Amino acid sequence: MARLAVIGNISIDHRVYIDGRRGAALGGAALHIALAATRAGLAARPVSLIGTDLAGLNAHPQLARLDLTGVATTTGASASFTLTYDADGNVTRTDADYGAATGLTSHALRHLANQHDDAYHVCCRHPLEVARVLHALPSRRFSLDFTLPSAPMNIAAATPYLPQAGAVFVNSAEYEVLAGLFPVASLAVIVVSDGPRPTRLLRRGRLVTTTTPPTTAAVELAGAGDTLTGTFLASRAAGLDEASALREAVAAASSHTTGPALTLPGAD
């Protein structure tokens, strides 16, 4: 069976929404993407480094189907992020305490040297040293995503490797940054989400297809974009064409916003 490795953070996320709601949950792009891919039928594992405060991850009931063999535990606290969202579910501010994730780059490089996966997705977000990880990937199938607060720095770091990426996932604001720094016509596929507005798929800079999300009563915005990414990758791996894969991905992301957050290990 094909397997996807998702290199990035697993974290404790403190969310701040525009309507004043706040909450803490288990998060991180690598976790959400790998979990969405698994739910869509593709074996996937996050490649992440956590602290002892998340040591109960293996027994987490919401992660029962997820392969956690790429997750290592080290002393200290896990990465912790305070994420501020706008009305469309886009992160407008990130305050970070990287904790154990400061060792993520070394952990990822060890995984790449010692393990084999059929495809890789790299979450180009701090504190990962993007250029070092991507340097180990050009001969392998890989895709990328970015997040707005660190997009300029990480897009610049990824520039030599972007033409080899199978797909790049961004939201509309991140796409503007990407287009300002790199010739998007050189990229195989770009998936651009835009909150409740149509999600676009561009091939070599040209619009191929769009899908409009259904209207939902959103409860949980964190992880929606990552759910789209993981579902799209799984759908393409299953043989769906790009338009069908995008429809599946948008539907999964919309459904994600109506469900509960991932609880922290040990939470009632």
Image: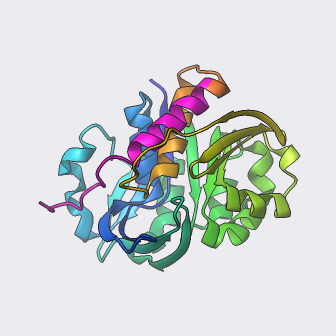
The percent coordinates of residue 26 (x first, y second) are 31, 61
The percent coordinates of residue 186 (x first, y second) are 86, 45
Q: Residue furthest left?
A: 268
Display colour scheme: rainbow
**Residue at the image point whose x is 67% and y is 67% from the top:** 151
Seen from the viewer's position, the closer of residues 247 and 116 is: 247
Q: Is residue 114 visible?
A: no
Q: Is residue 31 left or right of residue 236?
A: left
**Residue at the image point whose x is 51% and y is 59% from the top:** 89
Classify 234 as above or below 177.
above
Q: Quadrant of residue 78?
A: bottom left
**Residue at the image point whose x is 48% and y is 65% from the top:** 104
Q: Is residue 73 left or right of residue 177?
A: left
The percent coordinates of residue 127 (x first, y second) are 54, 71
Q: Is residue 120 left or right of residue 173?
A: left
The percent coordinates of residue 7 (x first, y second) are 51, 53
**Residue at the image point whose x is 87% and y is 45% from the top:** 185
Range covered by the magenta-colored residues: 244-268
Q: Is residue 20 visible?
A: yes
Classify 148 as above or below 141.
below
Q: Quadrant of the C terminus?
A: bottom left
Classify 85 as above or below 45.
below
Seen from the viewer's position, the closer of residues 193 and 46 is: 193
Q: Quadrant of the N terminus?
A: top left
Seen from the viewer's position, the closer of residues 44 and 39 is: 39
